Amino acid sequence: MTAPARIGRYELLESIEQSSLGVLYRGRDTLLGREVAVKVMTPGFLDEEGAEERFFHEAKAAARLQHVNIVTMFEFGEQDETPYIVMEFLRGFSLTQRLRKPPVMTLREKLDTAIQLCAGLDAAHRQGVVHRDVKPANVWICLDGTVKLLDFGIATAASSTATVVDILGSPGYMSPEQIAGGEIDTRTDIYSAGVVVYEMLTGHRPFEGDSPTGIMLKIVNESAKPIADSQLPPALTAAVARAMAKGPADRYASAADFGRDLKTVKSAVTSQRDTATMVIDREELRRLTAAPPPGREQPRTPNPKPQPAVSAGPVWLRSPQMIVLVAAVVLAAAIIGWCATRPVL
């Protein structure tokens, strides 16, 4: 696809990412002078009858979403029969990139990401918007740690004649009802979010195979292997299993409920870490203050050599009365001596 130098009032500066749905560019708003992200959809994206109407309907719904964990959409339009979406430009990396980038994510970082993912989904669900394509590639981690959900509404607006792989990139995050063509609601996103968290914790998706068809068959017919990691809190693995339940009725009723359980796990993990630090500190204090074991004396500092005391004079001179008496005697003796030596006139 040949990149246009400009679309609408936006200059397209460089291509950032390309997928079956279109190309994402770093662009510049020539009117406001700000950096933006412009997603130019693939030609033929809206060829099916009714697809254009669905696209703009979903784009309008996504544009209403105002939340810290959802990418902000500025504008959507069409030029030369090519639809495009303009969004805030984000610096950072996708969750897909972060999972491959050292250092390895800590458990706290994984929980933070999952909690923010649930918060973004809950905000969208409250506005009646279902994402339908939750996966690590659509979870963006900003440089300050803020998590943003991308590409709301694009999957459902895509042509139904496209293959599942064309629309969603990978079937590994799809819910059983999506694959079976059943009714899709907010619990579909909860399932996909559970798969994302599962992958963060284990390093792989719950269902993998040699082909998209094989993966989809496993999702529909098999149960995911429980997370077998004794280092993880059981409450965390239980929460992920509930989010990924085969039947929508067995999953969390809302993304907020899933996020609430994840927050509880995070609080417990943080508390345990702080308690462990306190135990270490107490052990160190106990070591420093404990009495030596039998047969082992603490080293003693040798007594310093006594210094001779500085005399303050005879004891009888230390009384103020005696000092006055002595002074009087000395004065009288001086007067008598002077008188004795004075010549007689």
Image (spheres, helix red, strand yellow):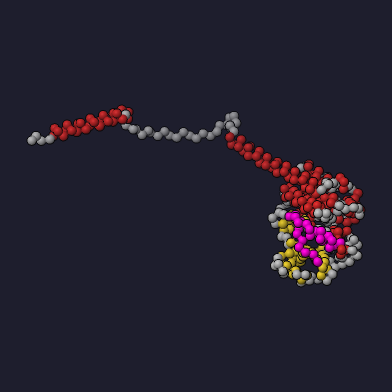
Decide whether residue 97 is among the magenta residues. no
Q: Residue at x 70, y 57 (%)?
A: 143
Q: Residue at x 91, y 53 (%)?
A: 182
Compared across the picture, whether 220 is left or right of 122 comes to: right
Compared across the picture, whether 292 is left or right of 38 comes to: left
Question: Toward which corner of the image does residue 10 lie, by quadrant?
Answer: bottom right
Q: Is residue 95 above or below residue 35?
A: above
Quadrant of the snapshot with the N terminus: bottom right
Q: Residue at x 41, y 33 (%)?
A: 306
| Farthest top residue in view | 316
Question: Toward which corner of the image does residue 210 lie, by quadrant?
Answer: bottom right
Magenta stretch, residue numbers: 54-77
Q: Is residue 137 visible?
A: no
Q: Residue at x 70, y 41 (%)?
A: 272
Residue 297 versus residue 54: which sits nearer the camera? 54
Decide whether residue 67 is among the magenta residues. yes
Quadrant of the snapshot with the C terminus: top left
Query: How far across and how far down the image is residue 68, in percent?
Result: 73, 55
Query: How far across and how far down the image is residue 139, in percent?
Result: 77, 56
Residue 289 versus residue 322: which sits nearer the camera? 322
